Each structure stands twice: as structure tokens, then as C-alpha cells.
Image (spheres, helix red, strand yellow):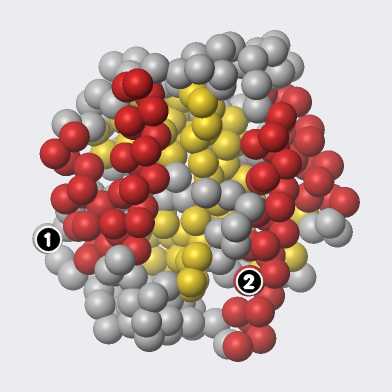
């Protein structure tokens, strides 16, 4: 497994790609409310990406039929937007988006509440977000990749939540998915040594109930097997000799 190290010029392009994506994301978040369809979010996201002169990297990726993944409640990831899927008060909705700017990919995800949501849902979303930050405390040159995985697991497990095992984070750069794969659960080995200039998409997917997931007949939508809620939190980060730089977090999106 070869993990690419980005040059100074490539890092600049990654920064710009991620900044543009964060702006798209903030504008998508702004329309999330009861009554809109999941397709409305996809349409807006694709329009904004193209207005910036960028390309949606999810569209047609292995045949995925939309630009934005919109996953509601027990849908974990890769929900396919549909005009008849209307968001309801109390739903939680995970948006996952990415784009290509001058050949460089960005990728991020957040879970939002639609109107007022339950305390349980709020806690799940909050813990999923925090698990990302616990993970990336370990994300610095000289540490090992699975230090990140172990830290996410150690934080989430006491909640009794299920950590999704069938899907993982990934390296990112001139491709959406590069080496290495980044599991969100504890590993026995250490994984590759982290080096400055690696760009990674760290993305815990956490279920309120059990970890098991299944695929719907559309072959894309991943749902929890037990029907419990699921949350997702993802940023593209840059490994440095000190703190990682969170490239998709420049103040527009928490
Ligand atoms: N953000 C997702 C990931 O990291 C990408 C969605 S896959 C797609 O794997 F096919 F929908 F693009
Ligand atoms: Co990703």
C-alpha cells in the first residue's frame, strides 16, 4: 500500500478544493427543513458545485446516480436523493458531498436535525462529531494510522453505540478514494506510519443501535439492520508535523 505525499502545490489545490466544498455544504445546510425533498438538496448541491467551475465527484462514481448522498434516519450513507422523499420534522439527515477542483478531490459529511429532534438523536450526532475530533488528536506525523481508529473506538464504545465496520475512511487527492483505508474501530496492528503531506478523509459512521448494516435493493443505500438511527461526520484533513489541518473546516461548517 502506497500512501501519496502531496507536494506544496498539491496541498494548495487540496486546500482550495476543500474550501469550495465547505461553501457548497453551508448553502445546502441552509435549506434543510421540513417539507423539502432529498432531491432538492442534491439539485442545489450540484448547481453550486458546477457554478464554481468544479465537478461533482460522486456523480456516476461506480454508477452512483447523484451528486450528493442524502441519508435519512436509519440510512447510514449513500442514500439516493429522490423528489418523493420529503424531510419531516424530527428526522435526521446525513449529507455527504465532494467535488473536484483542478484535478483535486475534497470530501465531507455532516448529520443535521430537521426541525426539533429527540435528545437521543442529538446525543448521537454530537458523539459522532466528537469521535472525529478524538480520532484526529492522534493524526500527526510519526504516529500510526490505526492510532486514529483506536481513538474513535475508545470514545464511542462507552456510549453503547455501534461503529459501522463495513465502510471506512480513506486517503484522498487526485482520486476520491486513495490508500489507506481508515477503519473507525479498534485494530490489532498499528497501520502505516503517518507522514506530513498525507491527505485523509476521516469519517466515523455511528449507529444508535447495533453496528450491522445492510444494502437496499437499489444497491447503494446502506441502512442499519436493526432500524436504529445513524450519524456520519467527515472531513478531509492534512497530516503535518503538528496538529492536522482540517481542510474542510474553515469556519463555515461545524
Ligand atoms: N463520501 C463517500 C466516501 O467517502 C463517497 C460516496 S460514494 C459515491 O466514500 F459513490 F456515492 F460517490
Ligand atoms: Co469519504
| Percent of width and height locating residue 111 | 49, 35
**Looking at the image, which is closer to me, 116 or 46?**
116
Give the position of the N terminus as an image quadrant.
bottom left
Query: Callout 1: helix, strand or loop?
Result: loop
**Looking at the image, which is closer to me, 107 or 34?**
34
Query: Callout 2: helix, strand or loop?
Result: helix
Q: Is residue 78 left or right of residue 119?
A: right
Confirm whether residue 71 shows in the render: no
Label 1, on which residue? 188
- Label 2 near ligand 2 (CB < 8 Å): no
| Percent of width and height locating residue 50 | 84, 50
- Label 1 near ligand 2 (CB < 8 Å): no
Taking the spot 87% from the left edge, 51% from the top edge, the residue there is 51
| Percent of width and height locating residue 212 | 27, 28
Q: Is residue 142 left or right of residue 157?
A: right
Q: Is residue 3 left or right of residue 20?
A: left
| Percent of width and height locating residue 31 | 71, 29
Confirm whether residue 12 shows in the render: yes
> In the drawing, what numbered circle is on residue 14?
2
Q: Which is nearer the N-term, disc 2 or disc 1? A: 2
Taking the spot 51% from the left edge, 41% from the top edge, the residue there is 110
Q: Is residue 70 left or right of residue 192?
A: right
Q: Which quadrant holds residue 208?
A: top left
Q: Which quadrant holds residue 126?
A: top left
Amino acid at each position: 500500500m502506497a500512501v501519496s505525499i502531496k507536494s506544496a502545490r498539491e496541498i494548495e489545490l487540496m486546500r482550495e478544493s476543500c474550501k469550495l466544498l465547505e461553501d457548497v455544504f453551508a448553502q445546502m445546510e441552509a435549506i434543510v427543513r421540513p417539507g423539502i425533498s432529498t432531491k432538492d438538496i442534491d439539485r442545489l448541491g450540484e448547481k453550486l458545485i458546477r457554478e464554481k467551475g468544479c465537478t461533482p465527484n460522486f456523480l456516476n462514481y461506480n454508477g452512483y446516480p447523484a451528486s450528493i448522498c442524502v441519508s435519512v434516519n436509519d440510512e447510514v450513507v449513500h442514500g439516493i436523493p429522490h423528489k418523493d422523499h420529503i424531510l419531516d420534522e424530527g428526522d435526521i439527515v446525513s449529507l455527504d458531498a465532494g467535488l473536484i477542483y483542478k484535478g483535486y478531490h475534497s470530501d465531507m459529511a455532516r448529520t443535521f436535525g430537521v426541525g426539533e429532534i429527540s435528545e437521543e438523536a442529538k446525543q448521537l450526532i454530537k458523539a459522532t462529531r466528537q469521535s472525529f475530533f478524538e480520532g484526529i488528536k492522534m493524526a500527526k506525523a510519526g504516529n500510526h494510522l490505526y492510532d486514529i481508529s483506536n481513538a474513535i473506538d475508545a470514545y464511542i464504545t462507552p456510549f453503547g453505540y455501534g461503529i459501522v465496520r463495513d465502510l471506512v475512511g480513506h486517503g484522498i487527492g487526485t482520486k476520491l478514494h486513495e490508500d489507506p483505508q481508515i477503519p473507525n474501530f479498534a485494530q490489532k496492528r498499528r497501520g502505516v506510519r503517518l507522514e506530513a503531506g498525507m491527505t485523509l478523509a476521516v469519517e466515523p459512521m455511528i449507529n444508535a443501535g447495533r453496528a450491522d448494516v445492510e444494502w437496499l435493493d437499489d444497491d447503494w443505500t446502506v441502512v442499519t439492520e436493526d432500524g436504529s438511527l445513524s450519524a456520519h461526520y467527515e472531513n478531509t484533513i492534512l497530516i503535518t508535523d503538528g496538529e492536522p489541518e482540517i481542510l474542510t473546516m474553515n469556519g463555515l461548517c461545524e
